[in-house]
Image (spheres, rainbow, N blue to C red):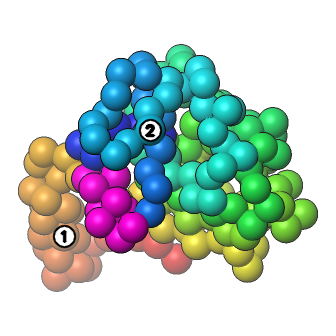
Amino acid sequence: MGWGPIGQWLGKLLQVLGLNVIVVRQSATPAGAGYETVAFDAVRGVLPRTDWLLLACPLTAQTHGLVDADALALLPAGARLVNVSRGEVVDELALIAALRAGRLAGAYLDVFAHEPLPADSPLWTLPNVIATPHSAGFSDGNAGRVAGIFLDNLRRWHTGEELRNLVV
């Protein structure tokens, strides 16, 4: 789901690997040669044929909660979900229930409805979940911001001040 720069790059990579890629985007306008294309409002028609549901779409009124309990139930048993878009695209409680029930083989999540993901979230401890700290994204100036935080923390450490963004 999603056919912006990230979705297009991933689609090309997956096609090279021999996977059948179905593009789900805002409109059903063909995404290109070799791609079946459907609009977000028709996604439920392709979910039963979806072994890997890769979310790389923006958060809009149309995509908010798009992957709910009903959508997850349409996926084949053993399907997997990858979310590098926005956490609110997925109903997390429904996702947790599907993972606990074994309906989904796994979820690979880089984004969550509430970030940072609360320490008591079951997503941290489910054996079929890989959770990362919203690190898949890239934006203009991101490298500069990261370097700035690092240099500020280096200065703070050197002067004995409290570090920023400390994870315990």
Which portion, as a residue range, is magenta?
9-18
Of 12 and 111, nearer the camera is 12
Near-viewer residue (19 or 115): 19
Q: In the shown orientation, is residue 89 left or right of residue 167? A: right
Q: Position of residue 139 (x, y in %)?
A: 20, 46
Can you identify the residue that label 2 sits on? 36
The answer to whether residue 150 is left or right of residue 56 is left
Figure check: 75 above or below 152 = above
Q: Secondary structure at mark 1?
A: helix
Q: Give the x, y percent position of residue 91.
A: 71, 40
Q: Is residue 64 visible?
A: no
In the image: residue 145, left or right of residue 42 = left
Sequence-first tag of 2 and 1: 2
The answer to whether residue 167 of the structure is visible from this angle is yes
* Residue depicted at 63% across the width and 59% down the height: 51
Q: Is residue 70 toward the left or the right of residue 117 in the image?
A: right
Mark toward the viewer: 2 or 1: 2
* Residue lying at 57% horizontally and 59% vertically, measured from the top left: 52
| Location of residue 67 (image quadrant) | top right
Q: Which residue is mark 1?
A: 150
